[in-house]
Amino acid sequence: MFRTLPMLLVAAALLPAGSLVAETSGHYMEARTCQIYTGPCFANGESGITGKDAVLAWRITEDTDNAVSLKGLSVIMVVRASHTLGFQGMENAEELKSLIVVDEKADVSQRAALVAFAKKHAGRAGDNVVDVRYSPVSLELETTELTGKLSAGKYVELSTRKARKGDCICSNESAYYPPLVKLENFAPGVTLEGKVNGRGLGVRWEIPDTRSAYMGEFYYE
């Protein structure tokens, strides 16, 4: 089950974290190699051809229930699938493999906890991790204007903004495919710059100026 921001409210700020009770919460960014802010005409044309790759990133801003605190740390998962990651997300793919990139400033215990966190919240992709790498990670999400920036060394460069009316082509665009993870508040966006080097997965892709992103907030109990 998921909750989207209506098209006319995309510009609004995400709801404040204080409105929900959570033990682990923070900011999330996602981008895929297919359009997610789109309509059926474009989605049908891409289905089975593109959208088999994705990058998911979490930054923990509050962590009140773990013996190992993850507050202020980030973790990224790069996903490669055999099928377009569509309405059923990870369940659409017969085969999945993933790479985890862990914030290198985490200590040994925190690194293990970040890997476990990503595996737990990434669905089937978390069951098929082929490699874990360590890198400086920076994730910044501005929740009023809805802009995001993600950087992870040689692995990921991603910048996003909220989707606007001017991004519409066929006039029936919506958050067509849901996010790949559980989120409470989210909005579709445009990937301004998107470069992913999935070392260990054998993939490298770029998706500049595409309607392929999500920005949001997570609350996990």
Image (cartoon, grey):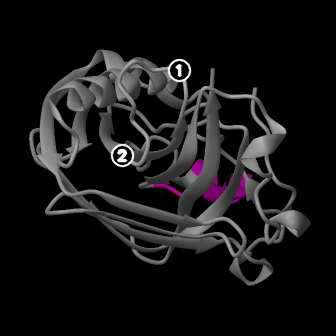
The mark nearer the N terminus, 1 or 2, is 1
Using the image, determine if residue 172 lies above or below residue 169: above
* Position in image of residue 183 (x %, y %): 65, 37
Whether the magenta-drawn stretch holds residue 51 is answered as: no
The range drawn in magenta is 34-44
Asked whether disc 1 touches disc 2, contact meaning CB atoms under 8 Å apart, the reply is no
Residue ID at (74%, 84%): 166
Give the class, few, some or many, for how many residues have Cα within 10 Å of label 1's Cα (few <14, many ≥20).
few
* Amino acid identity at mark 1: Asp
Q: Which residue is mark 2?
A: 73
Q: Which of 47 and 164 lies nearest the eye of the viewer? A: 164
Whether the magenta-drawn stretch holds residue 39 is answered as: yes
Using the image, determine if residue 184 lies above or below residue 189: above
Residue ID at (47%, 65%): 140
Q: Quadrant of residue 45?
A: bottom right
* Position in image of residue 179 (x %, y %): 60, 41
* Position in image of residue 167 (x %, y %): 69, 78
Q: Which of 41 and 179 lies nearest the eye of the viewer? A: 179
Quadrant showing the N terminus: top right
Q: Is residue 190 left or right of residue 22?
A: left
Q: Can residue 201 be spotted in the picture?
A: no
Using the image, determine if residue 71 lies above or below residue 91: below
Residue ID at (66%, 69%): 146
Q: Which residue is mark 1?
A: 65
* Amino acid identity at mark 2: Leu
Q: Quadrant of residue 78?
A: top left
Nearer the viewer's eye, disc 1 or disc 2?
A: 1
